[in-house]
Amino acid sequence: MYKKEYSEYVLKYSREYNVDENLVYAVIKAESNFNPNAKSSKNAIGLMQLLDTTAKDVARRIDIQILDDELHEKLQDVDLNINLGTKYLSILIDRYQNAEIALTAYNAGIGTVDNWIEKGIIKSDGSDVENIPYKETNNYVRKILRDYKIYSSLV
């Protein structure tokens, strides 16, 4: 049930970008349940369910060139998807300084999360994630935090 597939890539990029490997596994489990061909109704693609704009932005930051017409196909590549998804997680963790708010932004978007923090709907320290107003995002963050604990406890 708690798979650790694609460990060579998860370990490589979690170390490279300083993100806990168990958090990456929990995100992959929540986003695609380890299906590299997963595609959401919002056109998020691959194991870590990356949107085109996010994938292109992160790829640019780490000097990976992806042509628009090959983006969807490339995002199904396990190595590239885990690379970009883990780098994006690291960007969010650096920005918010905690995993709870980083996960919230991974799901709801940076602009939305910044707005919630600015309005006092949620705290920037992640101590009140139960107040996340989007039900889907609220459940998403709770699920990943639960799975992260489980992955962390596995030997």
Image: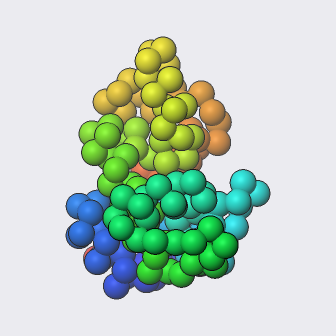
Task: Judge left or right: residue 43 versus residue 28.
Answer: right
Q: How was this image coloured?
A: rainbow
Q: What residue is rendered at 44% in x and 18% in y?
A: 118
Q: Position of residue 71 (x, y in %)?
A: 60, 71
Within the image, what quadrant is residue 22 found in?
A: bottom left
For the question of whether residue 30 can be seen, the reply is no
Q: Which quadrant of the figure has residue 133?
A: top right
Residue 90 versus residue 74 in the image, above or below: above
The x, y position of residue 15, in whole percent, is 23, 70
Residue at coordinates 29% horizontally, 68% vertically from top-left?
A: 14
- Quarter of the picture holding the C terminus: bottom left
- Residue at the limit of the structure toward the right, as seen here: 41
Looking at the image, the residue that sits furthest to the top is: 119
Closer to the camera in the image, 23 or 1? 23
Please name the residue shown 44% across and 80% down the image.
Answer: 79
**How many numbered badges does the structure rendering display?**
0
Using the rendered view, name the quadrant where residue 89 is placed. Answer: bottom left
> Relative to residue 20, is residue 46 depicted above or below?
below
Along the line of sight, the residue nearer the viewer: 76 or 69: 69
